[in-house]
Image (cartoon, grey):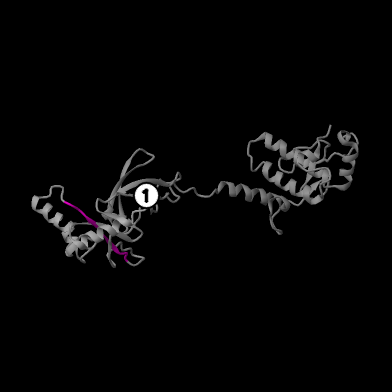
Amino acid sequence: MSDDYYAVLGVSRGASTAEIEKAYRELARKYHPDMNPDDSAAEAKFQEVQRAYEVLKDPEKREMFDRYGSSFDAAGGAAGGGNPFTGGAYPGGGGFNFESGGPGGATFDFSEIFGAGGGGGGFEDVIRNMSGRRQRSQPQRGRDIEHRLSIPFTTAVLGGEAQLQIQRASGKTERIEVKIPAGIEDGKKIRLRGQGESSADGASPAGDLFIQVAVSEHPCFTRKGNNLTVRVPLTPSEAALGTKVEIPAPRGAISLTIPPGTSSGARLRVKGHGVSKHDSNAGDLLAEIQISLSESLSEGAKKLYAELAEEPGERAHRDLLRSKLTW
């Protein structure tokens, strides 16, 4: 009793010749014995697909199958011929003729299945080339490795070097020197080519080492892009009268002039003294003023503050500040 050839190819009974050929090519590739060595189930499936195609591609045989259904074999319409890939015989007898190109002398173009160009050496060359491609498989490079590295804030800004230890798949621990580029940001990755795992065959390229950088916080500085902000504490008298203070910067300390009447929270910009990368201009340094009172005022200091609080200008300024407090 014949199979349902439409179901074998996965097409409907009203499928066009083009749809049948497309389904056949896909299944022939999938179950081809050269693609599935030593797989008897795949070989049997390939024979089934081949038999279904030989019937449905032929208008007369397809009509007989549509008419007789499961009695198609008894009606004498089953596809004959040997399995062109294994030399086995299909039900119905007959052999595959390489010279004539297909079962029973029918033309069978293997380039339809494998996409081979014309002018080749025949089917044997197609199989030989496919086997050769499988044996000459693409080289498998080694596995990539990811590692997390914590670095100081100053190293991230100025650049430097760091050491890390990598435990290989063999169990061996290896120490690697890493150059930290100036201006690297938190969360960025450094790629070291060829520092990953070695390839299995020993001849293919090794994998890469990806280092994710975690930048530690700084007690005085914060960073946004290429700009740095440093908190500069001042006494009330310094803020009121103005002064000069020396503040740290990435490329050395600088003298900063505080104008009289500077309020807490004000930011003074120092151009070009921020983060400097090799591929961009340096950012700026922002000095954020913080007015700080002594925790233990002397009696004399308290008396002076009391006198200051009663000054007309001080009282007017205090009233102005209070008026801004609204819901």
Question: How far across and down, in percent of the image, does residue 113 sit?
Answer: 71, 50
Q: For residue 261, what is the image quadrant?
A: bottom left
Q: Is residue 229 visible?
A: no
Residue at x 31% of width, y 66% of height: 282
Residue marked by disc 1: 211
Question: How far across and down, in percent of the image, does residue 61 sit?
Answer: 87, 43
Residue at x 83% of width, y 34% of height: 2
Question: How far across and down, in percent of the image, does residue 53 sit?
Answer: 79, 44
Residue 204 falls left or right of residue 76: left
Is the residue marked by circle 1 packed among few (<14), some (14-19), or many (20+) residues within 10 Å? many
Residue 15 falls left or right of residue 223: right
Pick the front one: 100 or 171 = 171
Part of the protein shown in magenta? 282-293
Residue at x 64% of width, y 49% of height: 128
Pick the front one: 52 or 319 = 319
Q: Is residue 266 visible?
A: yes
Residue at x 39% of width, y 40% of height: 169
Tell which residue pokes out farthest to the top in this image: 1
Q: Name the residue type under label 1.
A: Ile
Magenta-span inclusion, residue 97: no
Q: For residue 51, what is the image quadrant?
A: top right
Q: Name the image quarter holding the N terminus.
A: top right
Question: How far across and down, in percent of the image, does residue 80 sit?
Answer: 82, 40
